[in-house]
Image (cartoon, rainbow, N blue to C red):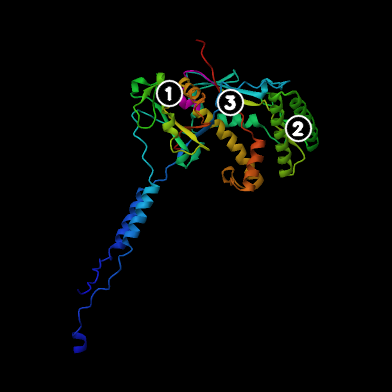
Amino acid sequence: MSKFSSKKKRANPEVSTASLPDIVFMLLFFFMVATVPREPELQMLLEKPETDTFKRIEDRSKLGFLNMGYRSKSEYGGEPWIQIGAVEPFKFANAERKIKELFPMITKNKKTTGFVLSVKIDSEVPMMYVDGLKDILRTKGLEQLEILYSSKPSGD
Amino acid sequence: MPRREAPEVNAGSMADIAFLLLVFFLVATTIEYEEGIPDKMEVLDPDKPKPPPPPDPPEVNDRDVLILYANKENSLLVDEKKAYTRAEIEGPKSDLIVDMVREFYTDPFKKVRAENYPWRIKLTPGIIADSLEYTQEQIDKYMDEGNTGAQEAFERSKTKLENYLFTMEYLGKREIWAMPDVARIMLKLDDETSYDFYLLLKDDIESGIVTLRDEFCKSEWGISYYEIELGTIVGEERRKVVHQLYPPVLQDKLEKKKK
């Protein structure tokens, strides 16, 4: 019996933690690579239209963004505001000058081949402003060729 | 000095940490993507001279163009005859536009001549061979003359003919009824038409075309249009064939108000 009772307190087998920093660094790098900067907050009301058919673009390095909407409901149907990135929104009347000025910001760090400009436009915007925007984007100096009318998949 | 042993850190909780991170990732990671309706835009270069129009432009019949006019009250006028309200188009079971598109495209393998829709043109390998010969002659002729506009126009029709020939061989058909080049669904808009009504119409027309392509893919290859694998040779060939039979014909245009 004494054989059993004289059981010595055994030390826990220790797991080597030498690889812990490696793992932490691996995760850190993963974060650094995979993290996408959050879209700047919209400073306007913008309700995208719904569609059944759509094209999906997953590669964000190809995408540029432009938003067009209203700052209050009372403005619906009138002259919309445009927001690019985190820059303070501007009225459509200033669009031509401002878009030219800000366009390098949209295309910064983007792939030049297959670049797509995603335009988020509020449902209430009249077509003349959409067409006006297209005219501005078509002028020389802004070289993108494809735009995407951003929409959300319809619920039914 | 006695050598001290390195103190070991207890790593038993590492697995816990790893799991915690794993769970965090699973919850927090969203695959972000952008969805929408694509639109190609041509960059206007004011320095580039406009190419001269090609000679003998093709004849456009009324039946070749389906005019949809979306006015500022957000209702739709079809070919200046029938009018539909937005509610009629938007209704959950409404296939109004889809049916319109279906009739417009008719059957690429049969001779269908409806009064209001484009008449398809019969193509057989023989006809295509003759046309190709003629097209090549024209290309050479305009190249000598230096008329690049006309030359490009004929080169486009040459590619088109070759694509039809490819389609016929691919499907093992002896004849195909081709859509006339001038066939268009013209979506006209008013200044005040709202953006969502425009997208709704664009979307419905696209749905109509996709439905037709989808039906064709199912009957021919037993797969849906969306299952065509792009990037593979088979996939690209199939896509080419389907797009040849049901080409995109939508054109939108804003009716500018007289100022």
Mark 2: amino acid: Lys
Q: CA distance from mark 1 to mark 2?
A: 44 Å
Q: CA distance from mark 2 to mark 3?
A: 25 Å
Q: Nearer the viewer, residue A57 or B111?
A: A57
Q: Secondary structure at mark 3?
A: strand
User: Can residue B28 be seen in this snapshot?
Assistant: yes
Magenta residues, start to end: B188-198
Mark 1: amino acid: Val
From the image, tell me which residue sits under label 2. B122
Mark with earlier residue (2, 3):
2
Q: Return the chain for callout 3.
A: B
Look at the image and say whether residue B251 sits in the magenta stretch.
no
Q: Residue at x 70, y 37 (%)?
A: B163
Q: Nearer the viewer, residue A62 or B132?
A: A62
Q: Is residue A124 above or below residue A1?
A: above
In the picture, measured across the screen, residue B44 lies left or right of residue A77, that is right
Q: CA distance from mark 3 to mark 1?
A: 20 Å
In the picture, measured across the screen, residue B24 lies left or right of residue A134, that is left
User: Can residue B22 be seen in this snapshot?
Assistant: no
Outermost residue toward the top in this view: B259
Disc sitting over residue B25 in the figure? none
From the image, tell me which residue sits under label 3. B251
Q: Secondary structure at mark 1?
A: loop
Outermost residue toward the front in this view: B1
Mark 3: amino acid: Gln
Are circles 3 and 1 on residues that touch, CB within 8 Å? no
Q: Nearer the viewer, residue B98 or A62?
A: A62
From the image, tell me which residue sits under label 1. A125
Are circles 1 and 2 on residues that touch, CB within 8 Å? no
Q: Nearer the viewer, residue B51 or B15?
A: B51
In the picture, measured across the screen, residue B122 lies left or right of residue B183, that is right
Look at the image and say whether residue B193 sits in the magenta stretch.
yes
